[in-house]
Image: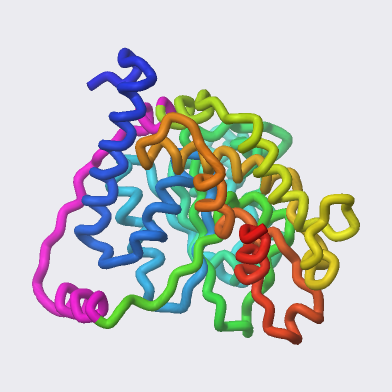
């Protein structure tokens, strides 16, 4: 079906069908992790990037490669290490046979980029992704190159190893729409995982949607109308995390050093739009905003020493914000 020839209502129904098919293909390989899969797909159709955080062995990389196969996008992977240079990401100039400089594109020139263990490289190298993630362009040797749409970065991070890692700068963190936490599988899920991975099993993942269709659905989501009350709620939710503001939540003054910026409010709305469409609604409500609040806000709240001393996590703060 040519999605560009159908009306918006039929396009929404088609998007829901694509969503179901995508999950079905991904679950051929990935056992459980329904919430994680839903959040990654939501970010993809929202034109957002994701940061996956989980201990080793939770199939973070396998999840990304499986999604790339189901999407039919040009996929590249960068293994971040302490000696990685910015040119290893964006590309570099070489002297060709005619004695002129020629720019060789780096792995960032793709549709779907896996930045594996992004916190293992210094901020200088991490910053090579800033322009690509925000402007969808790369500047090298004084020339600007436009990245092909759609462009989606999914980075992974190990939360337990501190030696040989570098914290992500706040500007880098803010470029990620979602911060997604992976947890251990349940007992029954782990039995299934062990059974499937310790036997001969050949699984093929089918391509469900093309790059052209993804762009169409992304633009469709941006056309979704939002009730002014829902818009106001999302902005209030983001701004109440900022200490010292007139509408600050009491927890902000007590536990937060820096709150979320305007990008949080933007991502709350676009994430709510996508969540609504994927769940059969034609316009988001407050429930949809709340559904994406944790992955949008948890990495945009900087706790103070008191919060850390009392064991108050970012998710606990978001929980309290949503109650009121």
Q: Residue furthest left?
A: 200
Q: Which of the colour schemes (rainbow, by chain, secondary structure, one colour) is used? A: rainbow
Q: Quadrant of residue 140?
A: top right
Task: Identify the residue shown where x is 41% and y is 60%.
Answer: 36
Residue 130 appears left or right of 154: right
Residue 70 appears left or right of 137: left
Residue 260 in picture, x, y percent from top left: 74, 54
**Is 193 a magenta residue?**
yes
Residue 183 in picture, x, y percent from top left: 43, 74
Residue 311 in picture, x, y percent from top left: 68, 83
Q: Which is more toward the observer, 69 or 218?
A: 218
Q: Give the quarter of the figure containing the C terminus.
A: bottom right
Q: Quadrant of residue 28?
A: bottom left
Residue 142 in picture, x, y percent from top left: 73, 35
Specify whether residue 105 is in view. Answer: no
Q: Give the quarter of the figure containing the N terminus.
A: top left
Q: Which is more toward the observer, 18 or 251?
A: 251
Residue 73 appears left or right of 167: left
Which residue range is magenta in the image?
Answer: 188-216
Task: Identify the residue shown where x is 34% and y is 60%.
Answer: 34
Q: Which is more toward the observer, 73 or 32?
A: 32
Task: Identify the residue shown where x is 16% and y is 53%.
Answer: 204
């Amino acid at each position: 079906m040519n999605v560009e020839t159908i009306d918006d209502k039929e396009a929404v129904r088609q998007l829901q069908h694509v969503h179901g098919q995508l999950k079905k293909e991904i679950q051929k390989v990935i056992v459980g992790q329904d919430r994680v899969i839903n959040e990654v797909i939501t970010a993809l159709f929202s034109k957002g990037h994701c940061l996956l955080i989980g201990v080793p062995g939770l199939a973070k990389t396998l999840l990304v490669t499986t999604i790339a196969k189901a999407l039919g996008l040009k996929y590249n992977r960068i293994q971040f290490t302490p000696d990685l240079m910015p040119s290893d990401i964006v590309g570099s100039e070489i002297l060709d046979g005619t004695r002129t400089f020629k720019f060789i594109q780096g792995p960032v020139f793709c549709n779907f980029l896996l930045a594996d263990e992004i916190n293992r490289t210094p901020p200088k190298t991490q910053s090579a992704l800033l322009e690509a993630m925000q402007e969808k362009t790369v500047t090298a040797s004084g020339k600007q190159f436009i990245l092909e749409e759609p462009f989606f970065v999914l980075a992974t991070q190990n939360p337990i190893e501190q030696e040989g890692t570098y914290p992500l700068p706040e500007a880098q963190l803010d470029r990620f729409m979602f911060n997604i936490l992976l947890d251990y599988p349940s007992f029954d899920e782990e039995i299934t995982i062990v059974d499937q991975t310790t036997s001969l099993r050949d699984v093929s993942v089918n391509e469900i949607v093309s790059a052209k269709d993804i762009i169409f659905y992304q633009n469709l989501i941006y056309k979704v109308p939002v009730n002014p009350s829902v818009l106001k709620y999302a902005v209030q939710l983001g701004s109440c995390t900022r200490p010292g503001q007139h509408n600050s939540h009491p927890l902000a003054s007590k536990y937060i050093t820096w709150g979320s910026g305007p990008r949080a409010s933007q991502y709350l709305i676009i994430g709510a739009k996508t969540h609504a469409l994927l769940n059969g609604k034609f316009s988001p409500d407050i429930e949809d905003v709340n559904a994406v609040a944790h992955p949008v806000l948890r990495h945009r709240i900087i706790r103070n020493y008191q919060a850390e001393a009392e064991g108050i996590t970012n998710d606990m703060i978001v929980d309290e914000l949503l109650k009121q």
